[in-house]
Amino acid sequence: MAYSKKVLDLFRKQRNAGKMKDYDGVGKVGNPVCGDVMWLYIKVKDDVIIDITFETFGCIAALASSSIITDMVKGRSIEDALKIVKDDVLNELDGLPPVKIHCSVLSIDALQEAIYDYLSKNKKEISEFLERRHQELEKERKEVEVKYKDWIQKEEDLHEE
């Protein structure tokens, strides 16, 4: 399985990694098949994402996808950020092996969940698409939590410290 030079660079030199303090929204997602887990934090001002960070426990592709989505979103309006799709992430990464494409989707899912969290907390309108996607992602997150219960609990405990 060959990764692009850009993917390998992003894996080695992750940008915007780490937990954000005083975030306005957080998206926590996981993949029930591979076990990757991602937290994405956003800071919003006037409906523009002014800061974004991530914590990812996963493979090279998941870490690179997390890093690139932060670069793609910082400075964009919430409306524009919600327009990002899998192909946008894949193009920015110069592609991923087919077996790893789900990692690019995971970063988009985390972004959508962070925006959902922000909109919910601020009692702002949530589109039907985003509400439906949130319900789907909640179901997947619960599957991950059941399947990887012990591991996730250890990560959550570390995450809270």
Image (cartoon, helix red, strand yellow):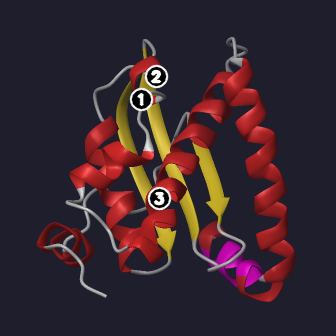
Q: Is residue 98 left or right of residue 139?
A: left
Amino acid marked by disc 1: Ala
Of mark 2 and mark 3, the one earlier in the sequence is 3
The residue under label 3 is 19
| Percent x, y of residue 121 | 71, 26
Q: Pinpoint residue 130: horizontal percent, then vertical percent.
A: 67, 29
Q: Secondary structure at mark 2?
A: helix
Q: Do residues under tags 2 and 1 come within 8 Å of each other at their CB atoms? A: yes
- The residue that mark 2 highlights is 78
Task: Kindly identify the residue that appears in the image at 67 percent across and 34 percent down.
Answer: 117
Q: Secondary structure at mark 3?
A: loop
Q: Amino acid at mark 2?
A: Ile
Residues at marks 2 and 3 touching, judged by CB atoms closer than 8 Å: no
Amino acid under label 3? Lys
| Quarter of the figure with residue 1 | bottom left
State which quadrant residue 119 falls in. top right
> Label 3: few (<14), some or many (≥20) within 10 Å?
some
Q: CA distance from mark 2 to mark 1?
A: 5 Å
**Considering the numbered disc 1 on the image, is that residue within a helix, a strand or a loop?**
helix
Q: Which stretch is magenta? A: 152-158
Q: Which mark is residue 81?
A: 1
Real-space CA distance between mark 2 and mark 3, rounded to the nearest whole angstrom: 20 Å
Q: First in sequence, mark 3 or 1: give its number.
A: 3
Which residue sits at x=75%, y=28%? 131
On screen, residue 82 above or below 33 = above
Front-most of residues 98 and 8 = 98
Q: Is residue 37 above or below residue 91?
A: below
